[in-house]
Image (tube, helix red, strand yellow):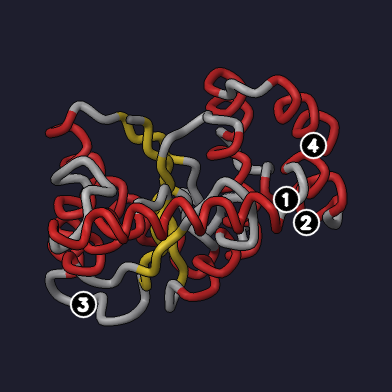
Amino acid sequence: MKIALINENSQAAKNEIIFKALKKVADAHGFEVVNYGMYSADSPSLTYVQNGILAATLLNSKAVDYVITGCGTGEGAMLALNSFPGVICGHVATPLDAYTFAQINDGNAISIPFALGFGWGGDLNLEYIFEKLFCEPSGQGYPRERAVPEQTNKKILDGVREAAFKPFTEILESLDKNLVKGAFAGEKFSELFFKDCKDEKIAETVKKLM
């Protein structure tokens, strides 16, 4: 599994802390972590809306399999990511949130409230969140006797979302050009994205919008 980390501007200073906690857990599972920044407050700025654009681009192009993101409260980034097809993002503040979201909702992204309660032990809470998020294959249901109806509801939701959205490249091209260009302005974006992107149409659209 390839996991992307994306930070927005208000929480850029925590990028290294989050990356370290995520990589420790990912390494134990043989997963790869790709850090898309922001790497510091001096990096090209990403708003939580741009987090959504970037995350959706990475997931729809299959450049990554999972996205870890967030903002101060985690709410804005969650809403931004869920505004796009191909993304199911949960709001995760605790290890229990992480486990139940993975097992019941079987999503491909989480948004963490990096500014809330992030004091002493904040790095440990992150590590425990990532441990519970990836401790088992997702979508198995919780409790297990609820697995069948939960999996059925997930398929129904996938169908509703497919009917509700336009093709992803059409969405990208319809958005404000400066907003989209800013989402792809990270200093390592081109280096990381184009080598991993598996959708030629999305890659060409991104190049055009950049």
Whichever of labels 2 and 4 marks the residue nearer the N terminus, that label is: 2
* Discs 3, 4 touching: Cβ within 8 Å: no
Query: Which residue position holds label 1?
Result: 182
Label 4 sits on a secondary structure element that is: loop
Residue 102 percent location from the top left of the image: 28, 54
Cα distance in 3D space between marks 2 and 4: 11 Å
Whichever of labels 2 and 3 marks the residue nearer the N terminus, that label is: 3
Cα distance in 3D space between marks 4 and 1: 8 Å
* Discs 2, 1 touching: Cβ within 8 Å: yes
Label 2 sits on a secondary structure element that is: helix
Q: Is any atom of residue 99 visible in this view?
A: no
Residue 16 percent location from the top left of the image: 32, 50
Whichever of labels 3 and 1 marks the residue nearer the N terminus, that label is: 3
Q: Write down the quadrant of residue 98 in the picture.
A: bottom left
Query: Which residue position holds label 2?
Result: 179
Work out whether 69 lies above or below 26: below
Cα distance in 3D space between marks 3 and 4: 38 Å
* Discs 2, 4 touching: Cβ within 8 Å: no
Residue farthest to the bottom, as pictured: 117
In which quadrant will I find the C terminus? Answer: top right
Query: Which residue position holds label 3?
Result: 119
Label 1 Cα crowd, 10 Å radius (few <14 / some 14-19 / many 20+): some
Mark 2 vs mark 3, foreground winner is 2
* Discs 2, 3 touching: Cβ within 8 Å: no
Query: Which residue position holds label 4?
Result: 210
